[in-house]
Image (tube, grey):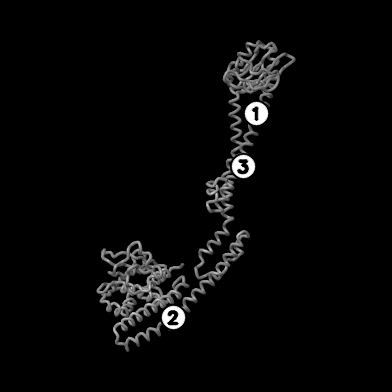
Amino acid sequence: MPLRLKAWLFQNSVRHFLLISLLIATTFISIIMGTWTYVQVRSNAKGVFDTSLAQAAQILRIILANQIYKQRLAELQATLNKPYSKHNTPSSSNFTKFEADELKRLNSNQLVFQVWNNQGVLLLKSINAPQAPLATVSFGSQDTQIDTATWRTFTLPDYRQGLRFITAIRADIATRFSAGQVLKSLYPLLFFCPLLALLIWVLLDWGFRPLNRIRTLLAKRSHDNLEDPIELGQAPEEIRPLVQELNSLFTRLQGAFEREKRFTADAAHELRTPLAAIRTHSQIASRSSTNTSALSALNKVTKSVDRATRVIEQLLLLSRLEPQDKILPEGSINISSFTQELLVDLVPMALAKNIELSLNAPKQPLFIETQSAMLNILIRNLTDNAIRYTPAYGEVEINLSSGIQTGGIHIEVIDNGPGVPLELRRRIFDRFYRQVGNKADGSGLGLSIVQLIVNLHHGTIRADSRADSKNGLCINIWLPEKPLAK
């Protein structure tokens, strides 16, 4: 099988392969059946014509054999040369009603006849029959070519009177009749093929439903629900080994995730105590030392310890947030007053860099159903991040509003720091990402945690440029007023 055809047949889909293969097989079998039907119908049609011609010759001999000698041939031929109608029929004095009707039928536009004697003289012929002999044989069927027309003939001799009765029909008329019969016989097959294709498609869809159910179960399963195995009762026998391996994989992944979480939590807890001790000793040493270089080194140690402590706290926070897949709200919180109270704790950090920290919120309350701890972490990390990356004497602006299009809460945090290039804005939400050349003191986890909390609320977060085209960064967050079902 050519590679292109093989690739087209499979297309990484068993269903597509089965559907195309079965349709090709059905089409091939239908062509064979159609060809066989065509040959059989053509053969049967030829036999039917031969039988009809033989019967017509028998009737013709019965009607005309005695009439040839009862009246003049010229008068009988003149009668045959007139097209028959209800006003022009053979004389009832010469023919019975049955004979007149049969002679009228035999003298039609499709069927022709000739009567010859043993001396080769044409005695009688139908109105549409040629003058040349329609057959050369003395008895039986024959195909004859006269001028440009082909005739199917049958010859019946009358040895007692020395006559030959020849009946014939043009081959093209017989062909048209055969074609009509073939089409009639093929109509059921032509109807059967689309019906069979539809049946194949329906059966394949029905056969793949167990796979679709398993796919739906996997799609609905959250990342922290790896303990419950997929029920084998819903799986066909052919894919049960695959389902069993998936269940085994989920079990191993669950164990790996739990070990990773325990390691992160244990490591963070183990590091907090020695870091606190190092910071305490560093502060004590700086108070008792008068050496300028030593004081500078001790201050750097203190800052490094503070940064490491913040990283550990953020890691602990991540380890608590990651297992969750939704927010269980503890009640409605007025985000305006909540943010105002929270910013009071961050004012000293802003004043240390002479940064103007402002909050713009509508007069009417903005309520959101969430957990106060989650909202605290989100706003604190956003504001903390903006203050850290804004240079001294800068500005950090927090805007709260009701989302007109989304119907939720819109949080906007704007700073006038160095900003982030467009191609790097997606990366600022990656863990431990720090822009090259940025000397701000941060852990690289703040915005990752913010994004995680936004996702838990089924909201959206985006980093944009400032609307006024000045240097800086604008973080836009849209949160629904009520937590959405997953």
Observer-side mark, 1 or 3, equals 3
Q: Which residue is mark 3?
A: 29
Within 10 Å of the Cα at label 1, are there few (<14), some (14-19), or many (20+) other Cα atoms? Answer: some
Within 10 Å of the Cα at label 3, are there few (<14), some (14-19), or many (20+) other Cα atoms? Answer: few
Q: Nearer the viewer, residue 116 or 134?
A: 134
* Count of residue discs: 3
Mark 2 or mark 1: which comes first in sequence? 1
Residue 40: image location, x then y, percent: 65, 34
What secondary structure is found at the residue carrying circle 2? helix
Within 10 Å of the Cα at label 2, are there few (<14), some (14-19), or many (20+) other Cα atoms? Answer: some
What secondary structure is found at the residue carrying circle 3? helix
The kind of residue tagged 2 is Leu
Q: Nearer the viewer, residue 276 or 469?
A: 276
Q: CA distance from mark 2 to mark 1?
A: 101 Å
Residue 352: image location, x then y, percent: 28, 79
Mark 1 or mark 3: which comes first in sequence? 3
Do the numbered discs 1 and 3 sit on residues whose CB atoms are within 8 Å?
Answer: no
What secondary structure is found at the residue carrying circle 1? helix
Q: Which residue is mark 2?
A: 271
Look at the picture and state if 313 lies above or below 232. below
Quadrant for residue 97, please give it.
top right
Residue 287: image location, x then y, percent: 32, 88
Q: CA distance from mark 1 to mark 3?
A: 26 Å
Q: Answer left or right for 301 relative to 101.
A: left
Q: Which residue is mark 1?
A: 46
The kind of residue tagged 1 is Lys
